[in-house]
Image: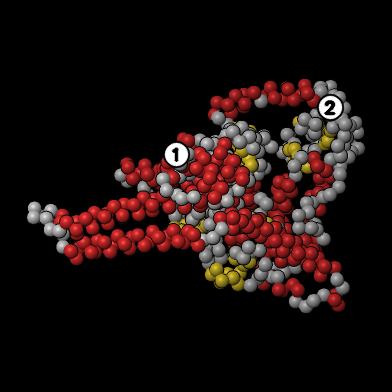
């Protein structure tokens, strides 16, 4: 099918073109259902492929976008070629008519006319070469398969990285259990520069798996005999199990020197090589572990989406801080939990045997602070009052807070109920308390694969916050006082880039920047990590490598 006059195609022409380039059936249906004609097709944006046509698959959107881009370019070149032909005909007519006695255009020197004709021929040849390249680029089916293979390779690489880490752990466990006479020589020293090697050393000494949480037993539920089945002993046992974790048998002074730390850029300092191959000096790695104590969004500890085993904490922190970090990590992994309303003690309800409870009082526990708790409605005990009545009473007592939240536009995390205020950024929320991803508008879970909420009804961005985000980018780039027309053009470009956050394949590069991190608000004093992909975001190093996934904006 020829690509002439694409702007005049009707829906049938578009479908014929789609089939001629072997577009997958699901994409053809999207074009047909949305009645996309030629004029609409060549003006579609990347965002509209998902929001307007409903194409959720990232490889499919990329493939169709490339085809549309090629179609758009082809149309522009064909228009250019037609203009060149008209221009060449005019020059030939001038040559044929001879000199003009009035001194008009026909008095142009013959050499100049030849140059004009030569330039037109070169332009024509460039256009013909482009069309030839398009024909030689091969089977569209192969291009579509290439996009699918790229996505599959990315996911497979993540899986292989995890298998590699587990394989090393299994090897170290096997070596630690072998008789001394059968242990290979120098097993310990070869992994010294690897943080994972040190983490495995801690795990093997304690015979625990990489992902194992402290404690694996169940606690009997209580109904009547609270004193006899006190939780105090259980909590103490857990604390004792954490404090009994052995520290590595070597110290940080024996670590090898790394060429240059990837965070502070200091050279020839003792440090680690992470599984993702990033070198970290001891000071920067310790700082990262310490920040995770105060910021749950950094848990689980990871770099480039590969987890860093938290069992290395005793090596880098004091014993109390290490136990605190291990406890925070365990809290994050637990799905069924509560906190004592009196002392805020974390309670893992997954370790509590499910009980039917009683009609008046529910299933009861006793916290280490001796507060008796009802785990059915997750409050203090309520003798002679049913859980339903107690929940209604508690909800009523929170009425002033809910009224304030409604007035201020706050929302509660659907998972942990913490209050959240959204002042900047999109409607994709990652709770700093429990790491739950949800939509700020409808509170439904966030679909990371599709880059939008599970309901599919909410916009990713509020227009006012989107404009504010674009304005902030201009201020950071010192473009706040440019010509109004130029400024508006920059605003539109940055708004379009911000909309791509949720499906951008990030590629971070370090550049000199001042301002705030777009993800966490950290003040950038010297440098920031700038995405060279579609979103062009500027974030701090911690967000680029320890918070934001390779695709999207978690």
Image position of 168 (left or right of 469): right
Q: Is residue 1 above or below residue 52?
A: below
Q: Which residue is mark 1?
A: 467
Q: Secondary structure at mark 2?
A: loop
Q: Is residue 233 above or below residue 394?
A: below
Q: Secondary structure at mark 1?
A: helix
Q: Which residue is mark 2?
A: 361
Q: Is residue 54 visible?
A: yes
Residue at the location (47% across, 39% down)? Answer: 10
Q: Nearer the viewer, residue 102 or 431?
A: 102
Q: Nearer the viewer, residue 44 or 335?
A: 44
Residue at the location (70% across, 25% down)? Answer: 395
Q: Is residue 120 above or below residue 538?
A: below
Residue 131 in percent (x, y) is at: 44, 58
| Crowd class of label 1 (few under 14; some 14 to 19; many from 20; radius 10 Å) | some
* Residue 153: mark: none
Residue at the outermost front position: 96
Residue 211 in percent (x, y) is at: 76, 54
Image position of 127 (left or right of 504): left
Residue 433 in percent (x, y) is at: 65, 42
Residue at the location (73% across, 47% down)? Answer: 333
């Amino acid at each position: 099918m020829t690509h002439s006059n694409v702007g005049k195609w009707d829906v049938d022409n578009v479908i014929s073109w789609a089939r001629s380039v072997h577009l997958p059936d699901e994409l053809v249906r999207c074009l047909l259902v949305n009645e996309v004609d030629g004029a609409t097709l060549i003006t579609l944006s990347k965002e509209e492929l998902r929001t307007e046509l409903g194409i959720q698959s990232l490889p499919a959107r990329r493939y169709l976008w490339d085809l549309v881009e090629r179609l758009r370019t082809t149309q522009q070149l064909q228009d250019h070629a037609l203009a060149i032909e008209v221009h060449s005909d005019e020059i030939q007519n001038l040559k044929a008519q001879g000199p003009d006695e009035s001194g008009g255009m026909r008095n142009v020197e013959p050499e100049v006319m030849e140059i004009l004709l030569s330039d037109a021929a070169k332009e024509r040849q460039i256009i013909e070469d482009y069309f030839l390249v398009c024909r030689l680029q091969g089977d569209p089916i192969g291009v579509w398969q290439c996009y699918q293979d790229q996505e599959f390779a990315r996911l497979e690489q993540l899986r292989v990285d995890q298998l590699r880490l587990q394989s090393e752990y299994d090897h170290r466990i096997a070596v630690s259990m072998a008789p001394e006479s059968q242990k290979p020589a120098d097993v310990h020293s070869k992994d010294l520069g690897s943080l994972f090697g040190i983490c495995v050393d801690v795990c093997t000494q304690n015979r625990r798996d990489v992902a194992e949480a402290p404690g694996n037993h169940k606690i009997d539920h209580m109904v009547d005999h609270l004193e006899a089945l006190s939780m105090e002993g259980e909590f103490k046992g857990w604390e004792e199990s954490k404090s009994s974790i052995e520290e590595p048998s070597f110290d940080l002074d024996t670590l090898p020197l790394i060429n240059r730390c990837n965070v502070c850029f200091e050279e020839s300092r003792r440090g680690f090589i992470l599984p993702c191959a990033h070198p970290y000096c001891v000071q920067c790695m310790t700082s990262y572990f310490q920040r995770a104590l105060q910021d749950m969004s950094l848990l689980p500890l990871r770099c480039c989406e590969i987890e860093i085993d938290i069992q290395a904490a005793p090596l880098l922190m004091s014993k109390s801080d290490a136990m605190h970090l291990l406890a925070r990590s365990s809290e994050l992994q637990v799905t069924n939990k509560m906190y004592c309303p009196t002392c805020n003690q974390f309670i893992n309800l997954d370790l509590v045997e499910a009980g039917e409870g009683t009609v008046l009082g529910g299933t009861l526990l006793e916290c280490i602070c001796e507060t008796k708790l009802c785990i059915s409605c997750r409050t203090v005990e309520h003798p002679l009052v049913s859980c339903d009545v107690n929940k209604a009473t508690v909800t009523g007592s929170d009425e002033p807070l809910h009224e304030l939240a409604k007035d201020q536009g706050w929302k509660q995390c659907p998972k942990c109920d913490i209050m959240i205020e959204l002042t900047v950024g999109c409607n994709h929320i990652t709770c700093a308390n429990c790491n739950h991803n949800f939509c700020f508008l409808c509170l439904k879970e966030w679909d990371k694969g599709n880059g939008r909420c599970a309901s599919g009804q909410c916009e990713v961005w509020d227009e006012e916050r989107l404009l504010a985000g674009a304005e902030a980018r201009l201020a950071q780039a010192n473009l706040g006082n440019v010509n109004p027309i130029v400024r508006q053009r920059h605003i539109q470009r940055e708004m379009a880039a911000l909309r791509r956050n949720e499906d951008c394949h990030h590629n971070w590069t370090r550049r000199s920047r001042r301002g705030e991190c777009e993800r966490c608000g950290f003040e950038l004093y010297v440098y920031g990590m700038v995405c060279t992909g579609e979103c062009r975001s500027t974030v701090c190093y911690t967000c680029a490598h320890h918070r934001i996934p390779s695709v999207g904006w978690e």
